[in-house]
Image: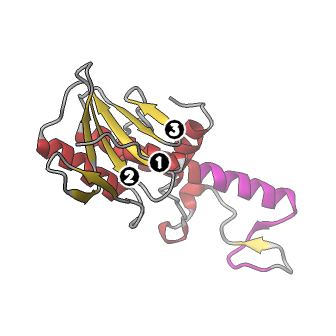
Amino acid sequence: MSETKLGKFIRLSVPEPLASKDSRKWFQTVCASISKGLIGSIQIKGDDNITRAVQMVGKRYSSGRAAYEIPLVRSLLDDEIEGIVDAWNQVYPTGEFQIESDADTVDSSYKGIPDIADSTMEDLAVEMAKYNHAIWANDMLAQGWRYGISFSEAERTHPLIMPWEQIPDSARRVNYELPSKFLEMLHKHGLLE
């Protein structure tokens, strides 16, 4: 097969060739991690002199390393690359690998957002909601509002100016995505490794 240089790509490099089922998992991981229609194809002339359109090229280097390249129709954004790294870490958690694209390189030392139990994330979401409620209630009190059975702008009363624990469950608002979004933001700004 002739050597082909891809313009826009995502590449998985590993110390030794993957089993064919694992190379298919790499392709499936990329397909599942990015928007439909981003995977391209390239024309490859095989040893039999027949040209074929392919969506992944496997390469083996003299060092023994192997690479699996997938052509793309555009360069990936950083969060798309990180999504692929996170997804591949789930499929290939103990393996040494490097993922590169025409836009960036991310090695397997990248672990993304820490693996935190769902129950802990839920507890964090509730704590954040309590904190936000306390700030809101204090701001309302500072502006001359007070507790009232019903909302009245004229009388400046609001039924939720009370401690979080006294608010009925039906009136509590908890954003359960907030802790993970916050951790992603910290990571994006280099504050969390």
Badge 3, how many Cα within 10 Å: few under 14, some, many 20+? few
When the figure is inspected, residue 96 is found, relative to residue 156, above or below; the finding is above
Q: Residue at x 45, y 33 (%)?
A: 106
- Tell me: 133 left or right of 90: right
* Circles 2 and 1: CB atoms closer than 8 Å: yes
Q: Secondary structure at mark 3?
A: loop
Mark drawn on residue 7: 1
Amino acid type of disc 2? Pro
Amino acid type of disc 1? Gly
Q: Which residue is mark 3?
A: 104
Q: In the rendered structure, does residue 128 fall within the stretch colored magenta?
A: no
Q: CA separation, marks 2 and 1?
A: 8 Å
When the figure is inspected, residue 122 is found, relative to residue 15, above or below; the finding is below
Mark drawn on residue 21: none
* Circles 1 and 3: CB atoms closer than 8 Å: no
Q: Residue 162's quadrant in the figure?
A: bottom right
Q: Secondary structure at mark 1?
A: loop
- Tell me: 124 left or right of 189: left
Badge 2, how many Cα within 10 Å: few under 14, some, many 20+? many
Q: Nearer the viewer, residue 135 or 24?
A: 24
Q: Earlier in the sequence, mark 3 or mark 2?
A: 2
Q: How is the image coloured?
A: secondary structure
Q: In the rendered structure, does residue 140 fall within the stretch colored magenta?
A: yes
- Tell me: 189 left or right of 153: left
